[in-house]
Image (cartoon, helix red, strand yellow):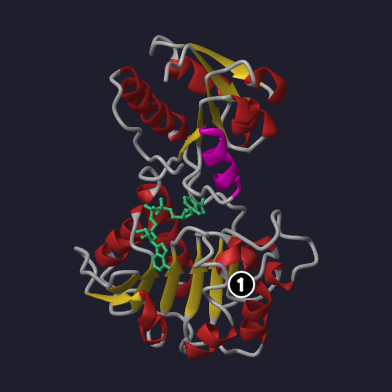
Amino acid sequence: MQIDRLGIHDSVSAVFPPEQLRDALSGTGPDVGIVDDQSARECDGVVTFAHEEEFLDCDWIHSIQAGYDRFPLDELENRGVVLTNSTGIHGDSVGETVAGYMLMLARRLGQYARQQERTEWDRPAWDVPFTLAGESVCVVGLGTLGRGIAERANALGMEVTGVRRSGEPVEGVDRVYASGDLHEAIAGPTFVALATPLTEETRGLIGEAELAAMDEGSHLINVARGGVVDQEALISALDEEGIRGAALDVFAEEPLPEGSPLWTMEDVLVTPHAAAYTRGYYESIAGLVQTNLERVGADEPFENRVV
Ligand code: NAD
């Protein structure tokens, strides 16, 4: 493969200005330019947020996200198009966001922010606030995101458990359960944080039965993908006080529709699929793309190859 023309698709503007990435990649070898759907066809490689049919004419697509559920994997395979993703760069940003969610819920900061909007001075009931120190979190999916979450939870003095397909131990996680023991793993902890990709195996991973298995005082955190959770079952569980609360960055439908009860539920935090946003994002993407340009040049295998 030879990458002479590299396009930065204009869809990356959902996360950062395309010019930032173009400038960061200038001088790395190929001719780098900002492209739309049509002009992407003329590129050997394209760096993108969205997927467009026109990319099937390229040799290589790099997704600026870790999730690759929006790409037609079988079609890419059949057409011989390489797909790489951006896993490995979100441990700090998403880890910090999840630490923030847990602090907001435990220390009632979400409640006070809502009250401030209404200029309302109101203290919580004595037995509602708690400290994270001594509480527990179960992290489902122990990759980049999961380990970033585990690291912060440890620093906050929490007990950290996790779920991983193999059940093999992971540094910084007190106990690791195999996927088959999911119900046992999520039954006790104060927080359950989801950090798996959305795959055939994980679609609807958390449904009615799993929510029923969770403790009544527990909270569900989803920074993975909306499809990992049965959202209707979650709304029912919150309504019926089967669980205490939730912090959600991803939803069945995005943007979350205006009429969704999740917007206004007490003890539910809604963030706009922005858990990984950070001003240095384009630099991390430039690093990944540059590594792969070098690998293509040296005829070595791609890093973060999905297809
Ligand atoms: P990663 O590949 O580093 O880690 C994913 C981990 O999940 C892997 O260890 C994998 O083995 C594990 N896994 C897969 N299926 C599992 C299952 N059934 N049970 C338990 N573990 C399972 O990926 P990552 O960078 O940590 O990202 C994970 C996902 O999070 C992405 O695919 C993406 O959908 C989502 N994500 C969301 C945001 C956001 O802004 N909210 C940002 C980055 C990633």
Please tell me which residue is depicted at 32% across the width and 21% down the height of the picture. Answer: 294
Q: Is residue 243 visible?
A: no
Compared with 127, 258 (above or below) is: above
Q: Is residue 275 magenta?
A: no
Look at the numbered disc 1 and say if its residue's Cβ is closer than 8 Å to ligand 1: no
Q: Which residue is mark 1?
A: 121
- Which part of the image, by quadrant, shows the N terminus? top left
Compared with 111, 68 (above or below) is: above
Please tell me which residue is depicted at 44% across the width and 44% down the height of the picture. Answer: 306
Asked where in the image residue 297 lies, by quadrant, the reply is top left
Under mark 1, the amino acid is: Trp
Q: Which residues are the magenta region?
A: 70-81
Compared with 44, 130 (above or below) is: below
Q: Residue 253: horizontal and vertical position, in percent?
A: 70, 59
Q: Is 192 or 179 nearer to us in this picture?
A: 179
Please tell me which residue is depicted at 28% across the width and 79% down the height of the picture. Answer: 134
Q: Is residue 36 visible?
A: yes
Q: Residues within 10 Å of mark 1 (few under 14, many from 20)?
A: few
Q: Residue 35: horizontal and vertical position, in percent?
A: 64, 19
Q: Is residue 73 magenta?
A: yes
Compared with 60, 190 (above or below) is: below
Left or right relative to 171: residue 164:
right
